[in-house]
Image: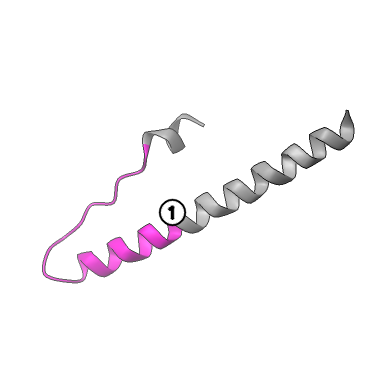
Amino acid sequence: MKKINSKKNNISKKFMVQLEKKASDLAESSVAKSCGMFTYEPTVPSSLLKK
């Protein structure tokens, strides 16, 4: 039972790392856009807020 749990935890950790990377990439691109001709308000996906 514990081995299954640790494997599941590893998968969710990898998933969270991917989510964080995507979020930081989005933040960087939004900053780049806001420094350009128009301002861009970054929005946080509701799926991230629910957790």
Asked whether 48 or 4 is in front, the reply is 4
Horizontal relation, residue 32 to residue 15: left or right: left
Q: Is residue 1 above or below residue 42?
A: above
Q: Is residue 28 magenta?
A: yes
Q: Nearer the viewer, residue 49 or 12?
A: 12
**Residue 34 at x, y = what percent?**
21, 64
Q: Residue at x 73, y 37 (%)?
A: 8
Residue position marked by numbered label 1 in the rendering: 23
- SS at mark 1? helix
Q: Looking at the image, which residue is at 29% across and 65% down?
A: 31
Identity of the residue furthest to the left in this view: 37
The image quadrant of residue 9 is top right
Q: Which portion, as a residue range, is magenta?
A: 23-45
Image-based side of 30 in relation to 14, left or right: left
Q: Please, what is the three-letter code of the amino acid marked with disc 1? A: Ala
Q: Residue at horizontal 36%, vertical 59%?
A: 27
Magenta span includes 22: no
